[in-house]
Image (cartoon, rainbow, N blue to C red):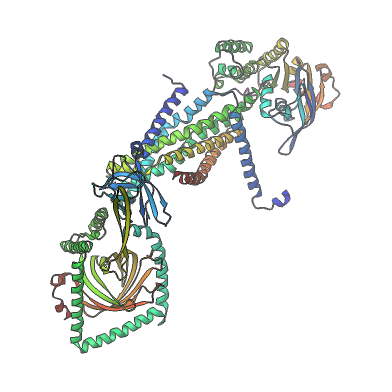
Amino acid sequence: MTAILKFIPFWNVLLAALMGLGDWCRFAWASITWTFRPPYRYHNFFYQMQFIGVQSLPIILLTGLFTGMVFALQTGKTFALFKMQNLVGSTVGLALAREIAPVFTALMVTARAGSAMAAEIGTMRVTEQVDALYTMAVDPLQYLVSPRVIGCIFMVPLLTMIFNYVGCVGAYLVGTTLLDIPSGPFLRHLYWYVDPEDIFGGMLKAAVFGFFLAMISCYKGFKTEGGAEGVGRSTTGAVVASSVTILVADYFLTTWILEFFTTHHH
Amino acid sequence: MIEIVDLYKSFNGTAVLQGMNLVIPTGKITVIIGPSGCGKTVLLRHIIGLWKPDRGKVMLDKVNLSALNRFQLNEIRRRFGMLFQHAALFDSMNVYENVAFPLREHTKKSEREIQNIVVEKLSLVGLSGNEKKMPSDLSGGMRKRVGLARAIALQPEIILYDEPTTGLDPIMTEAIDNLILEMQRKLSITSVVISHDIPSAFRIADQISMVYKGKIIETGTPDVFRNSKKEEVQEFIRKGEGKG
Amino acid sequence: MKLKPEIKVGIFAILTVIIIIFATIRVGDQSIVAGGGYDLYAIFSNAAGLYPKAAVEVAGVDVGVVKDIGLTPDGKAKARLAIKKSVKFPQNSLAFLKTRGFLGEAYVEIITGDPHLPSLKKGDFFVKTESGGDVTTLVNQFGSVADDVKDITGTIKGWTNEEKGGEIATTVHNLNDFVRVLREVSVRNEQNLDRIMQNMADLTHEIKGMVSNSRANVELSSERIASISQKIDEGRGTIGKLVNDPETIQKLNDSLDSLNDALGGYRSLELSLGFHTEYLKSSEDFKNYFDIALGLTPDEAVLLSLVNDTEPPLKRENRTTNITVGGTTTTVQTETAVLQRNKLLFSAQLAKKFYNLRIRGGLIESTGGVGLDYAQGPLNAQFSAFDFQTKFNSKPHLKALGQLNLTQNLYLVGGADDFINPRQSIDYFVGGGFQIVDDQIKSVMGLSSLAK
């Protein structure tokens, strides 16, 4: 059987990818089961939420503001051709709520917290601290992975909401000053076209992104081998794999969320 | 009593354990010696269930560790303490927090009780007053002793030592040896020591086993061991004593 | 002070929850929900472009939203309108489907009726509704127009490749013969030509009479045309007046302003007025055109036309009468169909010239359409395609026209109209017309002087 399969081009690459995926699934499942078993380490959980959420606040404020500003500027210039600048608010608001805020936030958290997770757990792995946890009857999945994953699931949506808000503020500033859009029509279109469903759909997405980015980053950290160089590899791998997963998952989630809200909306 | 029965393990096609059989008696110090890369550390990791064997089993008081799921394994590991070769201290925590870690995880003791235990364990390993230091501020020997304090904090039934004296000066080596002996005498702890330090092994061991090419080739009291007929054992003793 | 992570996370969470609540309230349709609105229904024959959450307005003031849009058993669009509790409508109020601007969103405009009548209650229907105008259709057809244009250009290419074959070629051939004969006639017999001109003058007079005798909306239209030409004379284009929407006009004006700014003002504007008539062989009917061409630049122009409709639609009018007999009120609905013989169609197109070729597009005979013209010496061939979403779901309306300029002002036309329409045979037509440009406009009244 395997002899035949070996003739498939890139069989080894395919096999490695499959094994990686399967291994990740087992890892994720084990982490989930551990999450729901006592003891519950609230302090770890809050510490991670603080690290992932509160400490990401400056970068989210900064990127959110500038994303909203630049987006407003670009759409404003284009809409000006049709004398429709008033729609900038709704366009930016909708795009932020549905797509940009969840994806950008998840990518920023990946870059900041995901890489830190991979590096931290990777270092613990190569210095046997992870094994030490095992020997002290503390499961590292429960001790290290659960709080990070839960933290991300809670914090990425909240950061997304902040990104949304700050992005709209940025768009408003650019719209009312540089593009000379009257603030009344700008806000009215924004409030009119953006639905709570758009915001909650975006936050739901963000929660899924949070799960994936934390689980992938922790997994990469866990699979670290070969000292400091290995830690570097894991960190890079975590950021790359998480980012790609976020973008791919975004497509499917968008489809599902649109499907859900359009079939249940009316 | 720990029984290792016909244990096989290979990594990426390289056979490391090739049918290992060993009985580790309760309340005694068993020193496992052998050349580097012979599978000593791999054996130790199987005893505490960090790795699962390809074949064979590890029995702890009639319980097959290899057959347990991860939750049951986690339960049974509370009976163990382990000192890693490089101590494996948590570098995000200071010395106090490292030693207090197992107590906080597994007991409902008050912070005051925990403090008493930590101070006691640290004085036992001769590191009183270093509570606030971070692991990165400590020397290799000090880290090992903190690691030992952490391993014995919960007063385990079995302590596994992975090369406890490697890289230490003779005085520190003797201090660690004495600690291992003291631990066993006071608390009748079952000790498993991985080492290639022959003099140290003869000083503390109740039983010495030698691993060679993935198998136990000799087991016995230090006297029996010293008079072994096996060529490999005699060569190892000769070279080890010459060095030590 | 060093805060514990729990406290930091707590502050953070409270902050975000405040933002979420704020955003949800702002974004939710709380104005209707909070006020506890009531639902009314309006039935439209075509609700294209209308979506849930579209505005319901009275005199430009928001009074509610469109909740959802469904179908009635007889296949019409039924819109549920959530109306603010404080707003009441008398029973004979009207609901219109309107569009804000060329690309703007559709909304429902309500014209309140007789305030003495009782108000509409929850679940009632608006008795009279009117679906959106041509702008909506135009906007919605935009995509399909693009596809059709592709087909048409392909077909034209096929025709032009045909050597002396096919219907068009024959038509053009025949037309050439006809024109040659006419030229000979005109050379030999000037008196006959004078008579043609006289007929044409009479015809114009007739049209004029028809327009002045027609009902208010037609009057309004002609008034608008007059005002447009006046404004164009003054050098201020208000072409948008043709489209019955103030916002569109505003936007069109703005666009034209910016366009003209770019082109260097109105100085280069070139205006021409024209009239021509076509006799349709199959329909046995005259089709009259009043044309205004506004040259923005040497190769860009706005073309406006008024056309009398040879296929007037039946306009249905519903009348609701309440008859009260012995305390019981019976509502009687009568439907009358009126043939609007004097209905006018509008064309408003933007044209751009490339050498001898001119591409135009926009509104043709009150529907979206495109066209392609080719001029060579005194000959001018025109091809138009419009009415893609036809009333009877038939093929688009195609028109091929050949034009021969006899003098600077007089020309003859011939061609085929609506020739792929399966409901009728090909409508060949012949006719003639006149046009005057810029400085001649002032002396437009003296028609006979043009025959020189």
Q: Is residue B87 left or right of residue C18?
A: right
Percent x, y for residue C281? 32, 79
Magenta run includes residue B154? no
> Which of A35/B65 is in front?
A35
Image quadrant assignment for residue C135: bottom left
Magenta run includes residue B83? yes
> Which of C2/A231 is in front?
C2
Image quadrant assignment for residue B174: top right
Bounds of the magenta span? B81-88
Residue at 39% across / 33% down in the picture? C21
Q: Quadrant of the C terminus of chain A?
A: top left
> Which of C183/C319 is in front?
C319
Percent x, y for residue C343? 27, 66
- Reply above or below: A204 against B1: below
- Reply above or below: A105 against C72: above
Residue placed furthest toward the bottom: C188
Residue placed furthest toward the right: B229
Camera sees residue B230: yes
Image quadrant assignment for residue C7: top left
Percent x, y for residue A158? 44, 33
Percent x, y for residue A219? 58, 35
Residue at 72% across / 23% down in the picture? B194
The count of marks equals 0
Camera sees residue C362: no
Q: Is residue C303 left or right of residue B180?
A: left
Q: Is residue B17 left or right of residue C27?
A: right
Looking at the magenta stretch, what is its main secondary structure?
loop
